[in-house]
Image (cartoon, rainbow, N blue to C red):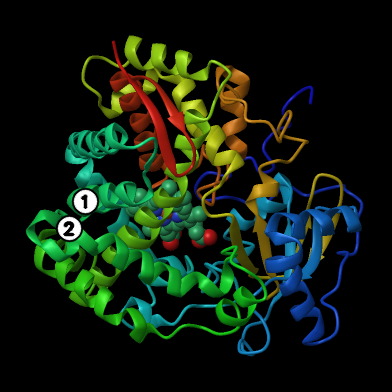
């Protein structure tokens, strides 16, 4: 790639405007939904079993020689009769960016496609992430979510650092006894303690059950909602028969959810009160939304993202750690703060590059609000009102028109002026990294907190250690800072 093309829309920031009129050749959207029942079931088996999600989208993109095409995505037949699996896949940066244009698309009940997990999982309330910007409740909940973060900012970094102290002390203790320390559950425990304290003002040490098992409760609650839509990788056809053919009822985790709900209700009083008085939510709406943003968005998102970040760094053998160590120690002042990160260009870039190659929420959906013309890099397509667009970010973020050597992890990709330009195309948060979450868009409310927190975790790591070895689930060696 010789130069970065201008962003697809001049103002993808808030609120995004429609993409500019295009002179691209008009093409009929290739692909088909197949015969009723047979098409969706065959696509479902390809998606979960024979091709896996990435292969599924890649193969069709090659077959149709187009990054925009029609296909089905699960869940489908036999017990999802009310779910319409038909989608228009959008797999390049240009076509994907239409998902952010709230004039063209709506985001009502499409978080995971046409399938909506039972509202029983969220106290019989449609929480904010399922609401479109046109729904008044969306604005209340989004403002509430942004307020939660703003209010927590004074304790965010000190809490992060003290919880990281505990986390790494534990990993060191395990490593002193065995060759490898699995870190996924300790990481989730750290996340739960940290997020409850910062976002809800709730100290998990005040409830032994939550302190010991809160993360398992959240894992079960998350899994049961999402199982019909995700590939787990257990032996087939067992996965298809038992995990992807029906929904799991809420009562299986109602005890866990009620424990979490009661914990937040009892220990998060101040935040809940603000939800009621400042944002016009009922007590119940405030608690369920707080629990969802904390447990699903923040805890769920970080649980997926941080292992891929640790993996990218701990498994590197190109000398990256030396550069990160130097930057973490020579910039940012003696005590870590949000400001410390400003000068840590490489650390930030590594965080962005990890989000590019492994976007934690790989699928994004939106429904056409009206008939409109959608453009990819090389063609234009007519989309009808009501059709569901589906973007698979793992491929979108490897768009060769935008990203040089797209399959390669390039730690410094987002540094220097050209690299910073590329942030216009980093879409992990359901909007460009240069955008601003607001009530008039559906961009992640925690967008900046996520990247800053991840960068602080890397900076902390290299102030404490000279080097680290490991992968996406365990640490095998730690060399303490000399
Ligand atoms: C690594 C962590 C995170 C990831 C990967 C992530 C990712 C996302 C994505 C992809 C969406 C858009 C979903 C869609 O509509 O298609 C989203 C929405 C949202 N996220 Fe995050 N998120 C993370 C952390 C957080 C945190 C810490 C918060 C705390 C406030 C948060 C709050 C929200 C909210 C409130 C929305 C809904 C926005 C709206 O309805 O307008 N997220 N997030």
| Residue 346 drawn at (x, y percent) | 48, 20
* In-image side of 23 versus 189 (left or right): right
**Residue denoted by label 2:** 211
Where is residue 6, by image quadrant?
A: top right
Going from the N terminus, do you reach mark 2 or mark 1 first? 1
**Residue denoted by label 1:** 193
- Is residue 307 placed above or below 147 in the rendered structure? above
Q: Quadrant of the N terminus?
A: top right
Residue 136 in sight: yes
* In-image side of 256 versus 326 (left or right): left
Crowding at label 2, few (<14), some or many (≥20) Cα neighbours within 10 Å?
Answer: some
| Residue 437 drawn at (x, y percent) | 43, 49
| Residue 395 drawn at (x, y percent) | 70, 48
Q: Residue at x 17, y 50 (%)?
A: 197
| Residue 87 drawn at (x, y percent) | 72, 70
* In-image side of 97 versus 143 (left or right): right
Q: Residue at x 19, y 56 (%)?
A: 200
Assign a secondary structure to mark 2. Answer: helix
Q: Residue at x 33, y 52 (%)?
A: 185
Q: Are the residues at dot 2 and dot 1 in contact (C-beta closer than 8 Å)?
A: yes
* In-image side of 283 versus 30 (left or right): left
């Amino acid at each position: 790639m010789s130069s970065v093309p201008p962003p697809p829309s001049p103002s993808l920031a808030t609120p995004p405007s429609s993409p500019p009129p295009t002179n691209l050749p008009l093409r009929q959207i290739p692909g088909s939904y197949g015969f009723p029942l047979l098409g969706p079931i065959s696509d479902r088996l390809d998606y979960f079993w024979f091709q896996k999600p990435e292969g599924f989208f890649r193969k069709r993109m090659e077959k149709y020689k187009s990054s925009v095409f029609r296909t089905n995505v699960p869940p489908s037949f036999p017990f999802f009769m009310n779910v319409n699996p038909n989608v228009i896949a959008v797999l390049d940066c240009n076509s994907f960016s239409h998902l952010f244009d709230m004039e063209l698309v709506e985001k009502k009940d499409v978080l995971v496609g046409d399938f909506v997990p039972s509202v029983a999982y969220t106290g019989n309330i449609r929480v904010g992430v399922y609401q479109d910007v046109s729904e008044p409740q969306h604005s209340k909940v989004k403002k509430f979510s942004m307020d939660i973060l703003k209010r927590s900012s004074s304790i965010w970094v000190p809490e992060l650092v003290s919880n990281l102290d505990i986390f790494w002390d534990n990993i060191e203790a395990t490593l002193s006894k065995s060759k490898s320390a699995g870190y996924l559950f300790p990481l989730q425990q750290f996340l739960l303690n940290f997020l409850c304290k910062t976002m809800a003002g709730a100290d998990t040490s005040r409830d032994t059950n939550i302190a010991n098992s809160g993360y398992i409760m959240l894992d079960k609650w998350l899994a049961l909602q999402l199982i019909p839509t995700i590939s787990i990788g257990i032996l087939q056809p067992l996965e298809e028969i038992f995990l992807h053919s029906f929904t799991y009822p809420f009562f299986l985790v109602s005890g866990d959810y009620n424990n979490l709900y009661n914990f937040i209700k009892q220990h998060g009083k101040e935040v809940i009160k603000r939800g009621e008085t400042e944002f016009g939510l009922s007590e119940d709406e405030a608690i369920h939304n707080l629990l969802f943003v904390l447990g699903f968005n923040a805890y769920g998102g970080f649980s997926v993202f941080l292992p891929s970040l640790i993996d990218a760094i701990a498994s590197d053998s190109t000398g990256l750690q030396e550069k990160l160590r130097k930057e973490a120690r020579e910039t940012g002042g003696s005590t870590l703060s949000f400001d410390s990160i400003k000068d840590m260009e490489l650390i930030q870039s590594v965080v962005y590059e990890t989000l590019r190659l492994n976007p934690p929420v790989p699928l994004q959906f939106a429904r056409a609000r009206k008939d409109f013309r959608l453009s990819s890099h090389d063609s234009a397509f007519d989309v009808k009102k009501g059709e569901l667009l589906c973007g698979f970010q793992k491929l979108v973020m490897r768009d060769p028109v935008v990203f040089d050597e797209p399959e390669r992890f390039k730690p410094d990709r987002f540094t220097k002026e050209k690299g910073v330009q590329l942030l216009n195309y980093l879409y992990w948060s359901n909007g460009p990294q240069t955008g601003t979450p607001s009530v008039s868009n559906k961009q992640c409310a925690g967008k900046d907190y996520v990247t800053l927190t991840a960068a602080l975790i890397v900076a902390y790591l290299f102030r404490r250690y000279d080097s680290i070895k490991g992968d996406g689930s365990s640490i095998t060696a730690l060399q303490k800072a000399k």
